Amino acid sequence: MIKEISEKIKYVTSGENPLSSDVILIYGDKATWVFDVGANDEAFDTIEHLICETLSEKEQNLQNELTGKRDVNIVISHFHRDHMGNLERIAKIPATGNRVNLYVSSYTNRYCKSGNIVDKEITIDDGVKIRIFPMESSHSKGCLCLAVNDEVAFVGDAIYPAYKTIDDESGKMDVCVDKFDNRRDYRKQQKVYNVQHMKSQLEKLKSLDVKKVFLAHEKNPLVRKEIMVVFLERIYNKREAGNPYIIQSDM
Ligand SMILES: [Zn+2]
């Protein structure tokens, strides 16, 4: 389902089977900005249409040839499959439509093996002010966020915790897994926040001049920034001296 945030910002809602993140569409003057590409057909079809639509318009009216092209600039929040699974299919779209540019962190680049690397904040004026910046995250390495004007910051899963299982016998922590991966049993899992990442994240969030934060995978994804800061500070204040993690039981 496509929902509207404002005149220039829409999004394809997230899905669960297969797990697929929200796909954000921002209509700039010269380009359509796409934040995350999801992993399901609806997300792919929407992006494919963006890449190919002006081609057919152009065929109907050759005079449009010069003005008909719009870049499609894709920014990936992090390397998890639900956020970038459709990249492989997008790469196979014949190069006759709009030009596609990809922006990823260097960590995400290890997985998708393509894209312009963004490891520090960049600002682009495209009728809307687009800022792409890294955010430290307990959930995943190499997270990028995207802020539009002073309206909203899209953070993907960056402010979520990691979800870790504790081995019953050894007490050792197992791999980080995504809460939204519905193939797993989460009842025995714990939310794990990294204290250093939270500190850096809170500083970044406070410094952002946006009114709202958009969280991936939520039914009501837009949260007032101040409320998000208070929510995270409550967790951060539970840190203990000498312990790099804050661990919470999920249930
Ligand atoms: Zn996700």
Image: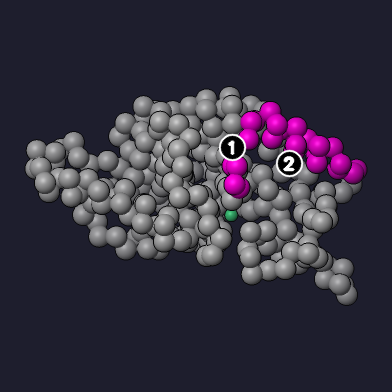
Q: Position of residue 189 (x, y in %)?
A: 78, 62
Q: Position of residue 98 (x, y in %)?
A: 26, 48
Numbered disc 2: secondary structure: helix
Residue 204 image-quadrant placement:
top right
Q: CA distance from mark 1 to mark 2?
A: 20 Å
Of the two numbered discs 1 and 2 on the same chain, state the one appearing first in sequence: 2
Q: Position of residue 188 (x, y in %)?
A: 80, 65
Classify residue 129 as left or right of residue 152. Answer: left
- Give, as a three-letter code, the residue at label 1: Leu
Split into quadrants, the picture shows ligand 1 in the one at bottom right
User: Residue 238 magenta-drawn?
Assistant: yes
Numbered disc 1: secondary structure: strand
Residue drawn 75% across and 37% down?
231
Closer-to-camera residue (217/85): 217
Closer-to-camera residue (127/170): 127
The residue where tag 2 is placed is 198
Q: Is residue 230 above or below residue 81?
A: above
Can residue 116 be seen in the rendering of this structure?
A: no
Can residue 115 be seen in the rendering of this structure?
A: yes
On-image quarter of the C terminus: bottom right
Number of marks: 2
Q: Is residue 35 above or below residue 94?
A: above
Task: Look at the image and give the residue range highlighted in magenta.
Answer: 218-241
Q: Is residue 39 above or below residue 213?
A: below
Q: Position of residue 136 (x, y in %)?
A: 65, 44
User: Residue 173 magenta-drawn?
Assistant: no
The residue where tag 1 is placed is 222
Residue drawn 42% across and 42% down?
25
